[in-house]
Image (spheres, helix red, strand yellow):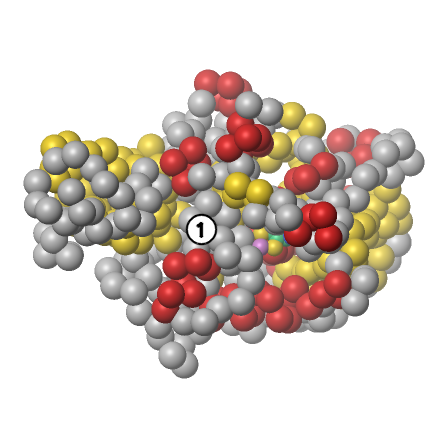
Amino acid sequence: LFFASFLIHRSAIDSIFGEPFNAEPPRSALVQSYVTPVPLFYKRNHGPIPIIDHIDNYSVSVTGLIDNPTKLFIKDIKSLPKYNVTATLQCAGNRRTAMSKVRNVRGVGWDVSAIGNAVWGGAKLADVLELLGVPKLTSSTSLGGRHVEFVSVDRCKEENGGPYKASIPLNQATNPEADVLLAYEMNGEILNRDHGYPLRLVVPGVIGARSVKWLDSINVIAEECQGFFMQKITKCSHLLSIGTILTGPQGGPKWISLFSAICSLEDVQMVKPGKVSIKGYAVSGGGRGIERVDISMDGGKSWVEASRTQEPEKDYISEHSSSDKWAWVLFEATIDVSQSTTEVIAKAVDSAANVQPEIVELKRGAQYIVAPCTAPSWPL
Ligand code: MTE
Ligand code: MO
């Protein structure tokens, strides 16, 4: 609650008029910890946050192309092995404010903090589906274009008053290595209402829009879900937001693309000449790790390597999963500021040797837009 006062309540006024609640923390607070405390974790909603009580009666119906449609209660999900997966969730519109300086874009005007890294606890979707007779992914499985659709309890105007929904390919849903969770815990605590209590999907490595909160039903369907958020928002956002999405083949997951942001400085900040510490985050999608982060102060002519960490705070160590391939890294470097105005650029490289571009560019006709993380000019 101490942290709550730090959150930027973008919709504080809107909410009086019934608009959804969206919030992001200040960038400097975001990089204080590897595991983002729940009160600092961004919140993105498209409708009123549902209140689900009577938890013993709560169930998720599972229907569609399966032999035995059924209802799953929380106790059924908790009876499966529990996994803790450290995964970074990022909204497709993260950093939209900067993007809107390059091109006119619509949507919530996020700074760089519509992102957070949490330890999600729950059952693996692959285990849940196996329990219901949908076999785990094997190399010989042929799934066609099947998807698994997740339908929520909340209602939103984009769906004409219908529920929020999204889908992921069946081969991702049934692959235990994909670490897709039906999560009931966040950072070792019961999921709170803002983040999907009592049960949400967590799809590591892809845009946050796929991680449906407040699950009501799960349906195995013949092809990608036709809902607004699958067809419009996310497929537009990869054109509209900076460096957020790498598109796969049609119907494939929309992986988060390689991205870094400097968070210890505002876009333009006054500092005293001397040593200045630069801190930020870097993240990539699809389970690719961050290999290095470089910092330049001369427009990309020379670079220094920043130090990187994925060290969880001690409260979370027992919850810590062995692999952090779905998680961001925090980076830090100390630079010497002597000139009157300095532009600092961060550039990340991931384990697939993708390199974050050094200049803001808008690739017209291509399926993505990329930008470096530039922070600021410094008038001294
Ligand atoms: N699930 C439901 N039911 N309703 C929503 O509005 N928003 C999505 C996703 N899941 C949303 C949802 C989007 S766009 C994002 S970025 C993430 O949830 C945000 O998750 P968070 O609020 O827990 O940070
Ligand atoms: Mo989002």
For residue 169, above or below residue 214? below
Left or right: 2, with 331 as reference point: right
The quarter of the image that holds ligand 2 is bottom right
Residue 138 visible in the picture: no
x, y percent for residue 262: 32, 44
Q: Residue at x 44, y 58 (%)?
A: 97
Residue bearing the label numbered 1: 111
x, y percent for residue 132: 80, 48
Left or right: 138, with 33 as reference point: right
Identify residue type, mark 1: Asp
x, y percent for residue 274: 12, 33
> Relative to the observer, which residue lies in front, 357 or 11?
11
Which quarter of the figure is the C terminus placed in? top left
Residue 91 visible in the picture: yes
> Relative to the observer, which residue lies in front, 268 or 139?
268
Q: Residue at x 27, y 53 (%)?
A: 374
